[in-house]
Image (spheres, grey):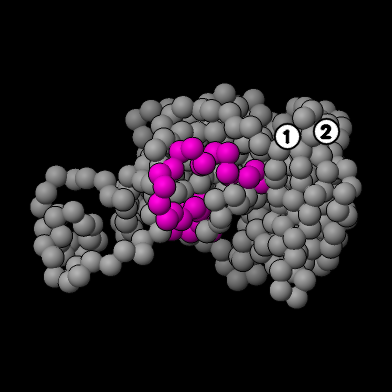
């Protein structure tokens, strides 16, 4: 077993509302892809309102790097291209068909393909957008070979989804995705794992270097792991990818199509029920949260409460997210709250008497 990297500085916030390990389906036909989810990408539209698309059809490409395209997660009709100030494209909304129609990219075994063929397949399908580049966390430049690729196989953020639970039935696609990624460049693939007594699904992956982390959040942040494994020096580039996105790449080669399906965690103290949901990328969250929240002023977040983005109750899941958080908006005011003993309050600095009481979870 590799040595354990211990993270000492950080904070685990004990919030209420962790997702119950039950996977449910959701019925919706409304989806959207948001160009604002891609740092430094300047979108050039390839579709118009009213046009029909298939799952895998390109919606827009990057004006600066025309080979990089963003695909449609579903087959259906482009209902609206929503623009903001200065006509910036904010959302491309799609109404899905009852029956999914996929573009056929062809099945293949990654080990039988060259690096150029795999890169071409990823660019043509739009799945190159799943690989991101450090520094700056932008979509990877296909013309630059990285020093290494890093994967964080767990999440330490508040109420984070459990990837071991999400990916328990996806080892075949995970393995194929790793094979494809490994052939793209000469460097190493590093996987960050939590120190645990139970065996991880990632343990059996071949041709990867495994590293174990222990400590509070942000121990699972891929940037923290890069810093401790092999820091990025001036002029160097490394790649990162999300575990569920490796599965998506694996399905491209195993099934010959872009399957945008993923499992997300519905979390938060403002929910009447928490669970995991099978969705497609860019799904509308209304049908997921509508009957599971109390009647109050709430904040809906695509992602976790620390780094996620606020969205509307009928907003759309961000491109890279695997979590929805629902919490009270917090507009209340407590008179002389700073002077109270704080029996029911959380404090990092141990300023409240709650520090001497049994541990609890907070809203």
Residue at (13%, 70%) from the top-left corner? 339
Residue at (31%, 50%) from the top-left corner? 363
In the picture, measured across the screen, residue 65 lies left or right of residue 12, that is right
Within the magenta stretch, is there residue 109? no
Q: Quadrant of the N terminus?
A: top left
Q: Position of residue 182 (x, y in %)?
A: 69, 41
Disc 1 secondary structure class? loop
Residue at (75%, 60%) from the top-left corner? 82
Q: Position of residue 32 (x, y in %)?
A: 70, 49
For mark 2, does the 10 Å Cα neighbourhood hold few (<14), some (14 to 19), or many (20 or more) residues? some
Q: Position of residue 47 (x, y in %)?
A: 88, 53
**Circle 1 sits on which residue?**
259
Q: Position of residue 5 (x, y in %)?
A: 38, 49
**Residue ranking furthest to the bottom:** 86
Residue 300 makes an appearance in the image: yes
The magenta span reads: 282-309
In the picture, measured across the screen, residue 44 lies left or right of residue 265, that is right
For mark 1, does the 10 Å Cα neighbourhood hold few (<14), some (14 to 19), or many (20 or more) residues? many
The answer for how far apart the CA atoms under marks 1 and 2 are is: 8 Å
**Residue ranking furthest to the front:** 295
Residue at (76%, 46%) from the top-left corner? 94
The circle drawn on residue 102 is 2
Please state which of residues 325 and 161 is positioned toward the viewer in this rendering: 325
> Is 327 above or below relative to 293?
below
Disc 2 secondary structure class? loop
Using the rendered view, name the quadrant where residue 238 is placed. Answer: bottom right
Q: Mark 1 or mark 2: which comes first in sequence?
A: 2
Q: Are marks 1 and 2 in contact (CB under 8 Å)?
A: yes
């Amino acid at each position: 077993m590799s040595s354990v990297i211990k993270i000492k500085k950080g904070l685990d916030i004990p919030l209420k509302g962790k997702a119950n390990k039950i996977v449910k389906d959701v019925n919706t036909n409304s989806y959207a892809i948001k160009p604002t989810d891609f740092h430094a990408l300047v979108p050039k539209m390839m579709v118009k309102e009213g046009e029909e698309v298939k799952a895998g059809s390109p919606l827009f490409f990057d004006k600066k790097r025309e080979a990089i395209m963003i695909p449609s997660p579903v087959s259906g009709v482009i209902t609206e291209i929503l623009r903001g100030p200065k006509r910036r494209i904010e959302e491309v909304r799609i109404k899905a068909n009852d029956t999914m129609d996929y573009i056929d990219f062809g099945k293949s075994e990654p080990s039988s393909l060259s690096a150029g063929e795999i890169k071409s397949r990823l660019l043509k399908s739009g799945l190159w957008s799943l690989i991101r580049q450090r520094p700056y966390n932008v979509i990877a430049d296909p013309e630059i070979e990285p020093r290494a690729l890093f994967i964080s196989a767990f999440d330490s953020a508040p109420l984070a989804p459990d990837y071991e639970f999400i990916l328990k039935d996806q080892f075949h696609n995970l393995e194929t995705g790793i094979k494809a990624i490994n052939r793209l460049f000469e460097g190493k693939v590093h996987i960050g794992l939590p120190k645990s007594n139970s065996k991880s699904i990632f343990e059996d992956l071949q041709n990867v270097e495994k590293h174990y982390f222990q400590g509070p959040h942000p121990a699972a942040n891929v940037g923290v792991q890069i810093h401790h494994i092999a820091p990025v020096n001036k002029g160097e580039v490394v790649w990162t990818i999300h575990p569920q996105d490796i599965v998506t790449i694996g399905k491209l080669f195993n099934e010959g199509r872009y399957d945008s399906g993923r499992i997300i965690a519905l979390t938060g103290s403002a929910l009447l029920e928490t669970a995991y949901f099978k969705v497609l990328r860019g799904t509308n969250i209304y049908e997921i949260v509508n009957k599971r929240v109390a009647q109050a002023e709430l904040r809906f977040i695509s992602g976790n409460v620390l780094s996620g983005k606020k969205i509307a109750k009928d907003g759309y899941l961000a491109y890279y997210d695997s979590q929805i958080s629902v919490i009270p908006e917090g507009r209340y005011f407590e008179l002389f709250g700073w002077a109270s003993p704080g029996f029911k309050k959380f404090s990092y600095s141990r300023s409240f008497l709650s520090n001497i009481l049994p541990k609890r979870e907070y809203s």
